[in-house]
Amino acid sequence: MHETTSREKILKRVRNAGLTSVDNRYSGVNQDAGIYAPAYDDDLLVTFAQELNNIGGSFVFCENRAEFISNFTVLIKSRKADSVFCVDDEIKGVLSGSGVAVDSDIQNRKSAPIIVTGCEALVARLGSVVVSSQSGSGRAANFLPEVHIVVAKPSQVVPAVKDAVDFLNAKYGSLPSMVSFITGPSRTADIEKTLVMGAHGPRELIVFLVDNM
């Protein structure tokens, strides 16, 4: 009987609370304001590099095109790859003098071990690469290969997700039909809690940030 009485008292208090109007103490909060302190451009680059490394990705900063070609060539040779797949015209133009064979035949995309793409933006706080259906490389190129290499510029680095959304809206007038945030290499621990890399996408994610492309 005591339990029933206690239960009834609690339910009565809950009902009464639902009938009582309470002023919203936070009605003046700016819902659009950022939740992070403003960051300088150099801080964003460092933050992105640290976060990308923390989630298993690799970051390579290049001051200019020549340094990018040099580092890129060393990387491809270390992977013993005969060619890379790339359909991005700007990146293909840069790689044309590198000595690395570039395959842009869409029929070979599924079997290419290394795919090189651009991106829409880089989110510093998460170490994420933002791609969309409007990207020149298309949707599938970011998820098919063993190794995904992204080439980006400092102007594409933004602080947080909200800034990436604003960046895309400003670029296209509205969000593309598909926007994806790639945060590190593909991984899963669904089976026996054992971490497996490359389960649903690339085993490696490497971001080249080129200051003067």
Image (spheres, rainbow, N blue to C red):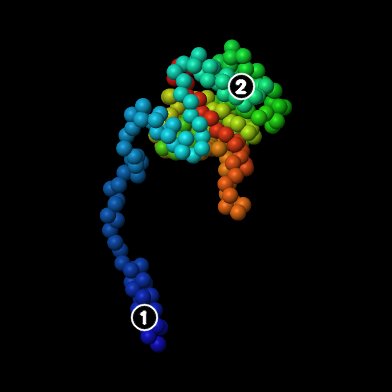
The amino acid at mark 1 is: Ser
The answer to which of marks 2 and 1 sits earlier in the sequence is 1
Identify whether 37 is placed above or below 73. Answer: below
Q: Secondary structure at mark 2?
A: helix
Q: Is residue 173 left or right of residue 39?
A: right
Q: Position of residue 31 (x, y in %)?
A: 35, 44
Residue 139 makes an appearance in the image: no
For disc 2, the neighbor class at 10 Å (few under 14, some 14 to 19, many from 20) is few
The residue sitting at the top extreme is: 97
Tell me which residue sits at (65%, 18%) in the image. 101
Per the image, the residue denoted by label 1 is: 6
Q: CA distance from mark 2 to mark 1?
A: 74 Å
Q: Position of residue 189 (x, y in %)?
A: 57, 49
Per the image, the residue denoted by label 2 is: 77
Q: Total marks drawn?
A: 2
Q: Position of residue 210 (x, y in %)?
A: 47, 21
Q: Is residue 25 left or right of residue 89?
A: left
Tell me which residue sits at (63%, 33%) in the image. 146
Front position in the image: 211 or 20 = 211
Identify whether 59 is placed above or below 56. Answer: above
Tell me which residue sits at (48%, 26%) in the image. 60
